[in-house]
Amino acid sequence: NAGVTQTPKFRILKIGQSMTLQCTQDMNHNYMYWYRQDPGMGLKLIYYSVGAGITDKGEVPNGYNVSRSTTEDFPLRLELAAPSQTSVYFCASSSGGKTRHGYTFGSGTRLTVV
Amino acid sequence: AQSVTQPDIHITVSEGASLELRCNYSYGATPYLFWYVQSPGQGLQLLLKYFSGDTLVQGIKGFEAEFKRSQSSFNLRKPSVHWSDAAEYFCAVGAGGSEKLVFGKGTKLTVNP
């Protein structure tokens, strides 16, 4: 059982480039989330989805886009990368609504924008 | 909206000593509470959770946490710390009407031999 899989694990981007961070889960979870983690700042929610075709903004959505065409996949798109987007990105999923079940996390993508 | 405070940014303990990591939350009703652990370079792993019932909950790796409504706290404890417990620990809170967890800023644990 793979759980939540994120690719790539590491990436260096130049300012202005674009990329997609991939996230796939095989647990048939309806809820999926993207967080970014910066040192000393904890986790900040970027976008989340409560099911295929439904997405919503978190607290720090600027500079990012998401889509959810299937239950399994929840890619995060960075357009026109900026140094402020240097961070570690985590994808997570949840089986139940209303946060009762907690999250299963992927192992993260470390992104550097230079 | 709910919020979480972890007052200690960094804690250092000796191997074999007891451990308590503090977590305070802000929410009007009984929240769902979680502790996660993150080893260096890894994702977050669920240690334990509370959402109702017995206020003392047991988790993996010998950890436990106690929900105290009067103090709005959910502190994590371990009676004897092992070197492998060195990691960063995150407290998180969920409200019954929300699809999202709110995370604290984390407490980094260093274990001295």
Image (cartoon, helix red, strand yellow):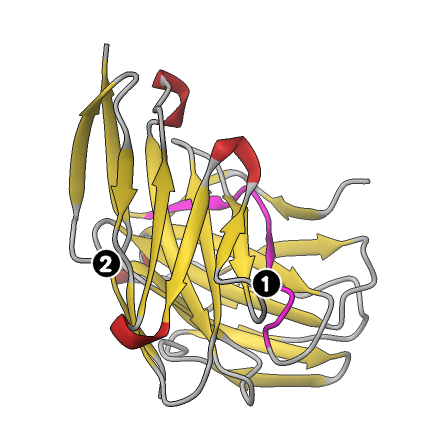
Q: Is residue A113 above or below residue B5?
A: above
Helix, strand or loop under label 2: loop
Quarter placement of the N terminus of chain A: top right
Q: Quadrant of residue B84?
A: top left
The stretch of residues the image draws in magenta is A99-112
Give yes or no for residue B57 being in the magenta stretch: no
Helix, strand or loop under label 1: loop
Residue at the spot 51% in from the left edge and 75% down from the top edge: A47
Residue on which the image places disc 1 = A102
- Visible in this render: residue B65? yes
Residue B59: % across, % down: 55, 43
Residue A94: % across, % down: 67, 65
Q: In this image, B90 relative to A51: left or right?
A: left
Q: Quadrant of residue B53?
A: bottom right
Residue A76: % across, % down: 56, 65
Three-letter amino acid code at the position of disc 2: Gln
